């Protein structure tokens, strides 16, 4: 059974302005006369009950449950020809015209509601995040209508193709500020971002292997460049050998929203030498904790795109297979290499962005992003521009070599 939330629009006050209609009369085969008439409608009131719904697919919907219209006065005035004579009898036409127009108001409004219902069926309930993961943006409850806005409480959960149990949505409400500066305000909670972090963790996105093929000029991917940090490494590898560094997260990252977006990560790192026949052998390993700070937040093509910078790095539980290692110097080298490589790989993986919920034929522009404790706010304006009509709106294209006199 569908839930509904009724919105009583109420009676409009009688209009102080009138509605007028002017039509030019053509010659009739028998009545050789012509002219114009003005039809004035006043004291028009309209009352509707509009129900806001959540349909079976979790999309918003509306239904016109009641409609009543009333036109109190209609005034008809003819001009031109023998209108001085016709105006003696216009009072006989005013009531039938008024009643006929009144009968048309609610059916016309029903047609508008039908168009709105059709548009709402295009609401994006799911969005692809990765190859095997989707974001569920379906409604948790019917839209809540207030005096100045409509609130949509969306799930914002991540579903994986291999997961047997659906993720439980966070039911804690997000408090959005009152604002009239933007048409749409979206709140993304810490819960939402931490679910995204779990998704990337489960999909092995946070497992990286760095080698010389990716970074041919890097000094930290050959054994010969570790002489000052690992003094005995030349005893094991007299000839400088190629290395790889593997990094993997050992826990899902934790995202904090305070005055900035910060991500804390824990992982394991290994330095491996690549022996002949591509047999890797471990040189050192360690546990690492890193704090990343979002240095760029953008909305591009209805997607939230985030990139990070390394803020802090801590190395612990260090193990060496080649004797003494200067841990502080190695930590500094790893910090540099992570900035140069691992962070680049993470940001490239996030470049696809996080899809935002939207309607078809709706363009969202003029974005403003603001971070408040526990929430990222995205405010924007909404434009209805059907793409099939976009070419009619845009100016004619001119080639670069086209010149005008």
Image (cartoon, rainbow, N blue to C red):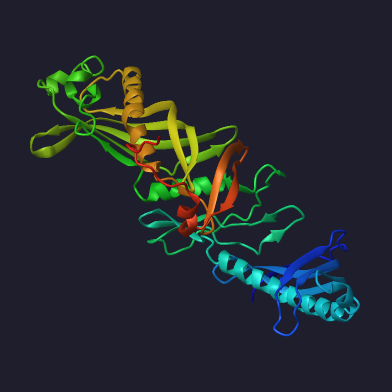
Quarter of the figure with residue 128: bottom left
For this rendering, which residue is in front, 62 or 293?
A: 62
Give the residue at the far bottom of this rendering. Answer: 30
For this rendering, which residue is in front, 291 or 41?
A: 41
**Residue shown at 83% from the left, 65% from the top:** 10
Quarter of the figure with residue 33: bottom right
Residue 94 locus on image (x, y percent) = 86, 77
Can residue 312 be seen in this snapshot?
Answer: yes
**Residue shown at 48% from the left, 62% from the top:** 166
Query: Quick one: quadrant of the C terminus?
Result: top left
Give the residue at the far top of this rendering. Answer: 228
Residue 254 locus on image (x, y percent) = 49, 40
Query: Quick one: quadrant of the N terminus?
Result: bottom right
For this rendering, which residue is in front, 277 or 199?
A: 199
For this rendering, which residue is in front, 235 or 72?
A: 72
Can residue 158 be seen in this snapshot?
Answer: no
Residue 220 locus on image (x, y percent) = 24, 24
Give the number of callouts. 0
Give the residue at the far front of this rendering. Answer: 32
Residue 72 locus on image (x, y percent) = 89, 72
Q: Is residue 132 above or below residue 311?
A: below
**Residue shown at 53% from the left, 49% from the top:** 192
């Amino acid at each position: 059974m569908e839930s509904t939330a009724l919105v009583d629009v109420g009676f409009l006050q009688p209009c102080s302005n009138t509605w007028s209609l002017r039509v030019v009369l053509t010659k009739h085969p028998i009545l050789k006369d012509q002219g114009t008439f003005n039809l004035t409608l006043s004291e028009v009131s309209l009352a509707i009950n509009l129900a806001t719904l959540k349909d079976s697919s979790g999309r918003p919907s509306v239904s016109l449950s009641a409609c009543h219209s009333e036109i109190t006065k209609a005034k008809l005035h003819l001009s031109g020809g023998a209108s001085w004579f016709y105006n003696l009898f216009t009072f006989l036409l005013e009531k039938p015209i008024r009643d006929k127009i009144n009968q048309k108001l609610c059916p016309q409004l029903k047609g508008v509601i039908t168009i709105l219902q059709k548009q709402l069926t295009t609401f994006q309930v799911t969005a692809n995040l990765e190859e095997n993961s989707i974001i569920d943006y379906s409604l948790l409850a019917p839209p809540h209508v207030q005096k100045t806005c409509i609130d949509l409480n969306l799930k914002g959960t991540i579903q994986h193709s291999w997961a047997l149990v659906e993720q439980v949505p966070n039911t804690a409400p997000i408090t959005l500020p009152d604002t009239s500066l933007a048409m749409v305000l979206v709140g993304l909670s810490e819960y939402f971002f931490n679910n995204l972090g779990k998704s990337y963790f489960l999909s092995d996105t946070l497992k990286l292997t760095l080698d010389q093929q990716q970074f041919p000029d890097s000094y930290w991917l050959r054994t010969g460049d570790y002489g000052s940090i690992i003094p005995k490494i030349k005893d094991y590898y007299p000839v400088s050998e190629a290395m790889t560094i593997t990094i993997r997260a050992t826990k899902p990252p934790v995202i904090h929203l305070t005055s900035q977006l910060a991500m804390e990560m824990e992982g394991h790192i290994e330095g491996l030498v690549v022996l002949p026949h591509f047999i890797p052998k471990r040189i050192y390993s360690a546990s690492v904790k890193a704090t990343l700070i979002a240095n760029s937040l953008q909305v591009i093509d209805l997607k939230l795109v985030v990139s990070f910078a390394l803020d802090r790095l801590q190395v612990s539980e260090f193990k060496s297979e080649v004797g003494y290692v200067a841990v502080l110097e190695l930590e500094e080298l790893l910090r540099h290499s992570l900035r140069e490589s691992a962070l680049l790989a993470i940001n490239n993986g996030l470049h696809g962005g996080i899809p935002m919920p939207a309607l078809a034929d709706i363009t969202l522009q003029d974005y403003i992003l603001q971070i408040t404790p526990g929430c990222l706010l995205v405010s924007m304006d909404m434009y209805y521009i059907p793409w099939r009509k976009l070419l009619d709106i845009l100016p004619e294209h001119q080639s670069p070599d086209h010149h005008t006199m």
